[in-house]
Image: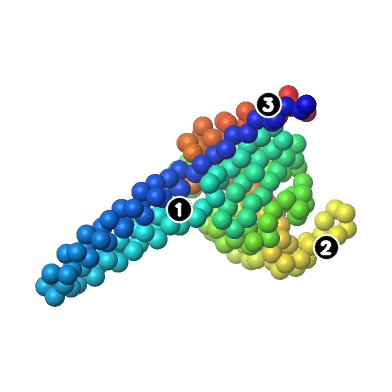
Amino acid sequence: MASKLPVINIKAQSNHHALFLMLTALILFITTLVFSLSYWRQFQLVLTFIYLSELVIFITGLAKYLQPKYSLSLNPKGIIYQHSCGHWQVDWLQIKRISLMNETLGFEQIQLPFIGIRLIQLSILAKQISPRLANRLIHEQRPLLALAIKLKYLTLEQSQLSFEAFELPSGESITGPLAAFLHHSSVLHQALGYHLFIPETAMDRELNEFCTLLKQCMKSSVEYS
């Protein structure tokens, strides 16, 4: 009987305290409601502001609660990134490099809140990412394009979204959100050197520690080949 492969599930720090926020908002709402029954006329503006604040707190907690339980799953075969809009997955053998992203802006060295992944071949993503997530990531990664333009790695024209078909090595043409994302990833690779970007908000530890974990998993994967 084959042994079950080990899995490291990562729960994003940004998703913590979801239930706490919703419960806090409900308790505050009930307290405010009781107070409003007697003092609504005297404190109408203040109470309205408090109600709106409670609504914001509840929605924030609900948004966290509706996120996938785990943002990332690491196993000897590869890595799976989970998002509310879908997922992408990549085998360790398909990865060329994993690294922190450091850039020089003027005289200052800055560390971007991402871990970059350079693939051996971009085209593998055509069948390994959800179309809905592909479309979403194009919008979420706009700050990376803006930075590349600011650093003069790209021109404004090069950063424009392409809706042309993407030609795979097999000769197959990909269209729609997947094609747009593959063009987008190609442009980011040209500018920043990576195809995929794991945001710091999806991690459960510091950037340096998480990057080390990914590299260790990638190195250890050969033991399960």
What type is the residue that disc 3 sits on?
Answer: Ser
Mark 2: few, some, or many residues within 10 Å (few <14, many ≥20)? few
Q: Residue 169: percent from the left, percent from the top? A: 85, 53
Instruction: Please tell me whether residue 132 is drawn above or below residue 83 in the rendered image.
Output: below
Of the two numbered discs 3 and 2 on the same chain, state the one appearing first in sequence. 2
What type is the residue that disc 2 sits on?
Answer: Ser
Of the two numbered discs 2 and 1 on the same chain, state the one appearing first in sequence. 1
The residue closer to the viewer here, 161 or 91, is 91
The residue closer to the viewer here, 128 or 142, is 128
Residue 168 visible, this orientation: yes
Label 3 belongs to which residue? 220
Label 1 belongs to which residue? 64
Mark 2 lies on a secondary structure that is strand
Look at discs 2 and 1 and give the one toward the viewer. 1
Label 2 belongs to which residue? 173
Mark 1 lies on a secondary structure that is helix
**Residue at horizontal 73 percent and vertical 51 percent from the top:** 128
Instruction: Please tell me whether residue 211 is drawn above or below residue 52 in the rendered image.
Output: above
Q: Residue 134: percent from the left, percent from the top? A: 65, 58
Give the quarter of the figure containing the N terminus: top right
Give the quarter of the figure containing the C terminus: top right
Mark 1: few, some, or many residues within 10 Å (few <14, many ≥20)? many
Mark 3: few, some, or many residues within 10 Å (few <14, many ≥20)? some
Cα distance, mark 2 to mark 1? 37 Å
What type is the residue that disc 1 sits on?
Answer: Lys
Q: Residue 55: percent from the left, percent from the top? A: 34, 64
Q: On the rendered structure, is 120 left or right of 9?
A: right
Q: On the rendered structure, is 39 left or right of 15?
A: left
**Residue at horizontal 13 percent and vertical 70 percent from the top:** 39
Instruction: Please tell me whether residue 23 is drawn above or below residue 70 in the rendered image.
Output: below
Q: Residue 190: percent from the left, percent from the top? A: 68, 51
Of the two numbered discs 1 and 3 on the same chain, state the one appearing first in sequence. 1
